[in-house]
Image (spheres, rainbow, N blue to C red):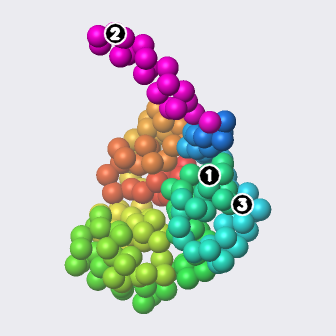
Amino acid sequence: MLAAFARKYTSSYLNALRPTPVLCQSVSLRHFASQQASKWLPWEDKLLQNYVKHNGKNWNEVAEHCLPTRTPSQCRTRWTDALDPELKHGPFSKAEKELLQQGVAEFGPSSWAKIAAVYLPWRTRTQIRNHYRSKLDPAINKEKWTEPELDLLLRRTIMFGQDWNKVAEGIRGRTPEQCSRVW
């Protein structure tokens, strides 16, 4: 009885579940977009800016109607990290540095989203993290490089090439920027 039921209904349900060409195209574009690590092109930025200006920040809609080769996450990140007109770019002012220090004192040196929301909403959490880690972190050694540090820099550069993040991981108190500059 079960076999007869399966034969009778399986083919009709499979046909109903078969993906349409449009669905296949949409899924393949999303898959391609999730694999895409290419730089954003100027025309993509313009499209994103115009779409958000006229239609808002529904990132699923933006990706579907405006930039089908980009994922909603890519669109949101591009907007929040680069294109939002409320963002400030360039060097941090003295006042911003003080606000950042207050934020780190209140939330700790890893709650960048909270610090951005409360103290520096015109800066991205990436800008805040990078500025703190490269300029304000008290663990940064700002003294002249010692011979043992230079030897370690040479060995780690031989091991990791110019991947300065990996090079700096093994040199206590030195940032990737410092390692790159000295090299």
Give the residues in magenta: 1-20
The three-letter amino acid code for the residue at tag 3 is Glu
Check contact, mark 2 vs mark 3: CB within 8 A: no
Q: Say which of 122 and 66 sits in front.
A: 66
Q: CA distance from mark 3 to mark 1?
A: 10 Å
User: Counting other residues with Cα less than 10 Å from the Cα at mark 1, is it few (<14), some (14-19), or many (20 or more)?
Assistant: many
* Residue at image mark 2: 3
Characterize the local packing of mark 2: few (<14), some (14-19) or many (20 or more) Cα atoms within 10 angstroms. Answer: few
Front position in the image: 136 or 26? 26
The quarter in which the N terminus is drawn is top left
Quick check: is 4 in the magenta stretch?
Answer: yes
Closer to the chain start, of discs 1 and 2, is 2
Task: Out of 11 and 179, give the one closest to the viewer.
Answer: 11
- Separation of residues labelled 1 and 2 (CA atoms): 45 Å
Amino acid type of the residue tagged 1 in the rendering: Arg
The residue that label 1 is drawn on is 70
- Residue 138's tag is none
Q: Position of residue 25 (x, y in %)?
A: 66, 39
Q: Is residue 96 above or below residue 9?
A: below
Residue 40 location, x and y as percent? Answer: 68, 56
**Residue linked to disc 3:** 44
